[in-house]
Image (spheres, helix red, strand yellow):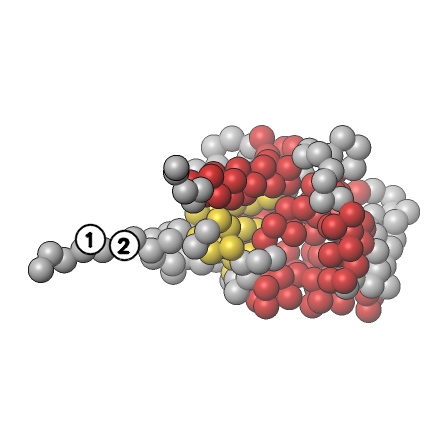
Amino acid sequence: MAVPPSQSEPDLHTVVFDVNILLDVAEFVGPPFTWAKFTSAAVRHQAAPVPHPSDRRVDSLKAVALTRSGHFAGPEMLEVWSSAHIDKLLVRKAAQPRDGDSPETRGLGWSRDDAEGLLHDFLYDLVFDSTGGGRVELDGVHGHPPLDHEDACVFTTALQAADDATPPSIKYCVTRDRAFRQARHLSSNVLVLYADEFVRLVQRSRRALAIKRIPRT
């Protein structure tokens, strides 16, 4: 009896969201964060064009929404990952006043409780409960320069996400920072994308799979 060829394992996709993407979503939904408010906003803007013509936060919202199922396309799994750097920066920026003197001291102006809730009810739920991802313990920083230290920490999180996966995961870092997106000489193991680019990539992959599955007559 012939032995059927072995089937390769589906690809694993890992995604790290830059803090600016997470803050976009938080600002759009408003404090305190709840998934019910998130879902309501996502449904209202489901038909909006990508990229959104006037509000980048909608693209960030859609990018996050596409990851919640834990699936990239078909059998290919998708995990969201984070790190202590991202976690701490998210809480700090959410709690900083809106009228700070510089971009480094300005944030969303949320209460400390709501900022902590954003970490636990939004990011941790997305990472651990929704997608089965994890938290990277950074061992050194890659990409600094050309990236500044904070962006390099985010990039390194993406680079080290699921680093024990076999075969290695397909890695994405989603940002709205132009300098980050356009930085050169970074490791090619991570694809750095704007939120709208990530949305279109996932949508194209899912459409292509759906077309492939249509029976031929």
Foreground residue among 57 and 119: 57
123 vs 43, left or right, is left
Count of residue discs: 2
Image quadrant for the N terminus?
A: bottom left
Which amino acid type corresponds to the residue marked 2 in the rendered image? Gln
Of the residues shown, which amino acid type is indicated by label 1?
Pro
Q: In percent of the image, x 84 and y 60: which residue is there?
A: 31
Q: Residue at x 54, y 43 (%)?
A: 202
Q: Are marks 1 and 2 in contact (CB under 8 Å)?
A: yes
Give the side of residue 26 with respect to residue 126, left or right: right
Q: Residues within 10 Å of mark 1 (few under 14, many from 20)?
A: few
Alpha carbon distance from label 1 to label 2:
6 Å
Q: Alpha-carbon neighbours of circle 2 within 10 Å: few (<14), some, or many (≥20)?
A: few
Disc sitting over residue 5 in the figure: 1
The residue positioned 76% from the left and 30% from the top of the image is: 53
Measuring from the top left, give residue 205's x and y in whole percent: 49, 41
Q: Which residue is mark 2?
A: 7
**Picture coordinates of residue 20, whole percent (x, y):** 70, 46
Q: Secondary structure at mark 2?
A: loop
